[in-house]
Image (tube, rainbow, N blue to C red):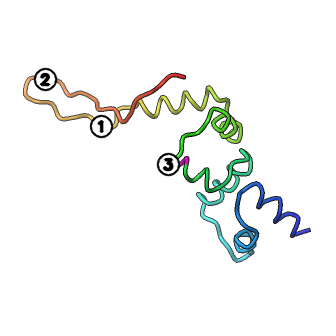
Amino acid sequence: MRSQVEEVLSRHTDHDVATLRADMDRDKVFTAREAVAYGMADAARISMPYLSELERGRKEASSEVLAAAARALGLGLTDLLSLAQDELTRPAQVRPARRGTPPSPRHDGMCLAA
């Protein structure tokens, strides 16, 4: 039974069985971040290495991957994109004003509409 579970997890997370055995050891304690990443990868059917590259900005996600990630989070794709837009257009900090001019917000990124 355990070997079947390891094989299924290996397919879903793209980890080799030896790594999974070490991770599933009762003495292994996941950080909250590790546990969420494992659950997210499994629910969205995204491999852990690919998810990690997406998170770091090394890969760009397709609309299908974004939709799968949104479903794994219990969101619709439009909800996820709306949250991303809010995050990208939120002012990061206020630049100090020069004499006689009001301070202006600085934005971290741009929002692109699909």
Q: Circle 3 — which element?
A: loop
Marks 2 and 3 sit apart, C-alpha to C-alpha, by 39 Å
Reading the image, the residue beneath label 1 is: 93
Placement of the N terminus among the 4 image quadrants: bottom right
Q: Position of residue 52 (x, y in %)?
A: 57, 53
Numbered disc in front, either 2 or 3: 3
Q: Circle 1 — which element?
A: strand
Q: How many marks?
A: 3
Marks 1 and 3 sit apart, C-alpha to C-alpha, by 26 Å
Q: Identify the amino acid type marked 1.
A: Gln
- Which of the marked residues, 1 or 2, is nearer the chain's N terminus? 1
- Which of the marked residues, 2 or 3, is nearer the chain's N terminus? 3
Residue 68 in the image: above or below residue 5: above
Residue situated furthest bottom in the rendering: 27
Q: Is residue 56 magenta?
A: yes
Residue drawn at x 64%, y 29% as measured from the top left: 77
Q: Identify the amino acid type marked 2.
A: Thr
State the mark number for residue 58.
3
Reading the image, the residue beneath label 2 is: 101
Tell me where the magenta segment starts and ends, as one range.
54-58
Numbered disc in front, either 1 or 3: 3
Q: Identify the amino acid type marked 3.
A: Arg
Placement of the C terminus among the 4 image quadrants: top right
- Judged left or right of residue 21, residue 88 is left
Q: Main secondary structure of the magenta part?
A: helix
Residue drawn at x 71%, y 44% as measured from the top left: 44
